[in-house]
Amino acid sequence: MTEQEMLKMYEDAGALLNGHFVLSSGRHSARYLQSALVLMQPRNATALATELIKDINPDDYDMVVSPAIGGLVIGQEVARQLDKPFIFTERKEGEMQMRRGFSIPEGSRLLVVEDVITTGGSVRECIAVVREFGGKPTTILAVVDRAPQQQDRFDITHHTVIALDVETFASETCPMCQEGHLPAIKPGSRGHA
């Protein structure tokens, strides 16, 4: 699949939104990708995961991990295709944690999978938890990178299949807020929608 074909998947699902959005990082943007609408179709999850792992050697990894909630569907599908155990981290009271009885055998090599990366905050938090539990995160895969020019966000290799350079703003400098035309909505997993 080409990047354009994958973006069309988002457009066809009504998942490439235009407006005034508050991202999970707290930054504002005029465009938003709602991956859940794309990934609700198993064939889309399968196709995107296939693209993500086409250059991955399954023998290089012991497990797959994703930060909840955005990375869950694509992480599970990547793990299924690689035939690896899948775990996830999640926030409780604002702090990323490993729960639900998950454990990581000491020294296990983990593939970190996310749906959309902007600042990379959730992925960095996930990586910190994995390390705290004795795992070795080695590679990050994400379907979409909203800030591909920011190559220094992570201390491990990361790859994406869609690079969509979308400008984001701090709330204090957001031109949409300053113009006052549209109220900012928070459609993501940490918001109300």
Image: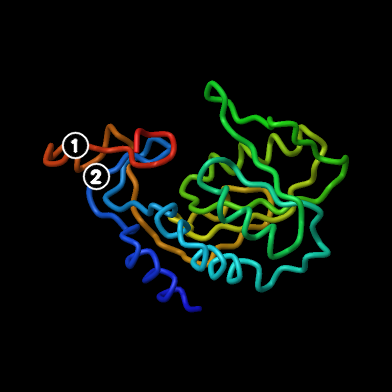
Residue shown at 75% from the left, 31% from the top: 101
Q: Which of 6 and 177 is in front in this view?
A: 6
Residue 176 x, y percent position in the rendering: 19, 42
Check disc 2 and report its element: helix, strand or loop: strand
Image marks 1 and 2: residues in contact by CB distance under 8 Å? yes
Q: Quadrant of residue 166?
A: bottom left
Does residue 26 lie above or below 148 as drawn?
A: above
- How many angstroms separate mark 1 from mark 2 (CA)? 7 Å
For badge 2, the amino acid type reads His
Residue 73 x, y percent position in the rendering: 56, 52
Q: In this view, does 105 lie to the left or right of 57?
A: right
Please give the residue where the numbered disc 1 appears in the rendered image: 183
Q: Which of 40 and 180 is in front in this view?
A: 40
Does residue 136 lie above or below 74 as drawn?
A: above
Check disc 1 and report its element: helix, strand or loop: loop
Please give the residue where the numbered disc 2 appears in the rendered image: 20
Residue 33 x, y percent position in the rendering: 38, 54
